[in-house]
Image: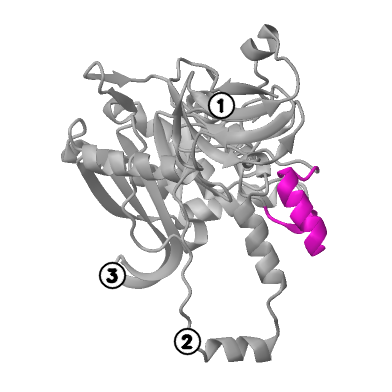
Amino acid sequence: MNEFTFKLPDLGEGMVEAEIAEWMVKVGDEVKEEDPICAMLTDKAAVELTAPVSGKVISVAGEEGDMVTVGSALIVFATSGEVTAETAEQPPIAPQEPAAETSALPVTSGKVVTSPSIRAQAREAGVNLAQVPGTGPRGRILKKDFEAFAAGGRTSTGPAAAAQTALQPRTGVTEIKVIGLRRKIAERMAASASEIPHFTYVEEVDVTALESLREHLNSKKPAGESKLTPLAFLGVALVRVLRDFPQCNAHYDKDRNLIVRHEAVHLGIATQTDGGLKVPVARHSEALSLEELATEIRRVSTAARENTATREELSGSTISITSLGKMGGIVSTPIINQPEVGIIGVNKAVDRPMVQNGQIVVRRMMNLSSSFDHRFVDGYDAAAMIQALKELLEQPALIFMP
């Protein structure tokens, strides 16, 4: 019997360490060459590693969430044969999934992705894994996913059971380790909040005319064709406004202590997905028409939700828009997506009584809650930019004038 130590390989782009996102094997498991053994998470990708040899797992580097440096022991196998130098130097690495700046990971397919041990448990418990939602890389069913599903399946349901449960004291707790994408999001949000002095400016906008125009244009579309959303109009208007406020379409390069103003407008569209918050990018929005921008926003947002977005589609935004849609509330305080210096927050549009020419009329009103990096965008300039954006949204014909 021989021992083979599988060391964490260089997963690209000069990385020096990676996080253990998921173990697919445990000590004592017998694995075959090319069986999946673990998923590692870098700043840019989730990478699935497979066994370079067949053998028995005798030790692993740590628990899920632990960091492992490149070149250090990741997993040790007991093997029955000699391991060639070629095998030792070329450990198998499954294709990478893009992880983006605040985002990440999985690509789902029709095939259930999980570990052999979970498959065995599922067979014993009579659980159909196709019905189990997976939260791991590439939609992989993790141990916690299986256990939660199995526990739920054994729980009685119905009004009587619900009423009985509601009337009894509840003492259970659920501990969820902050790892993977959720840890990346937490780290980025904390860094942004602690490093950037946010200046938030809120302005109400009368979007009655804009909504009328949008409804008119949508009514002309053939049945089944995608409709124009308010976000597309906001994007086109924002592109126009940024011509006069280039300091808001910029990055702060803290390593070089430089402000980098961009002529191109790469709109980041904050998108909530099952895997967490992602910011897909509508690149070169300044070169897109209203219809083209609407199509691109829809395309990259859908790709983010379906976990098929590429690395390029999930990075490089110069300014971001965030919206909670119909549940957008009255006011929000958006957190800037570093290294950007501004973010536009969209709140829900509602009909409200307003005074116009001395008369009370019903108007469609919407608030914009926007944040800027006060180190590089003065409060006056931030307010002036939002006021200019307000004018275009309230007089939408101006959006399309040269």
Residue, disc 1: 311
Query: Does 289 sit above or below residue 322?
Result: above
Quarter of the image where one finds residue 58: top right
267 and 304: which is toward the camera: 304
Quarter of the image where one finds residue 67: top left
Secondary structure under the numbered disc 2 in the rendered image: loop
Query: Does 371 sit above or below residue 341?
Result: below
Q: Which mark's residue is nearer the viewer, 2 or 3? A: 2
Q: Earlier in the sequence, mark 2 or mark 1?
A: 2
43 and 52: which is toward the camera: 52
Q: Earlier in the sequence, mark 1 or mark 3?
A: 1
Residue 154 included in the magenta stretch of the image: no
Q: Residue furthest top?
A: 85
Residue, disc 3: 358
Please provide the residue range marked out in magenta: 111-133
Q: CA distance from mark 2 to mark 3?
A: 57 Å
Query: Does 164 sit above or below residue 11?
Result: below
Q: Amino acid at mark 1?
A: Arg
Q: Amino acid at mark 3?
A: Gly
The answer to whether marks 2 and 1 mark residues whose Cβ atoms lie closer than 8 Å is no
Residue, disc 2: 169
Quarter of the image where one finds residue 244: top left
The quadrant in which the C terminus is found is top left
The answer to whether any part of residue 283 appears in the image is no
Secondary structure under the numbered disc 3 in the rendered image: loop
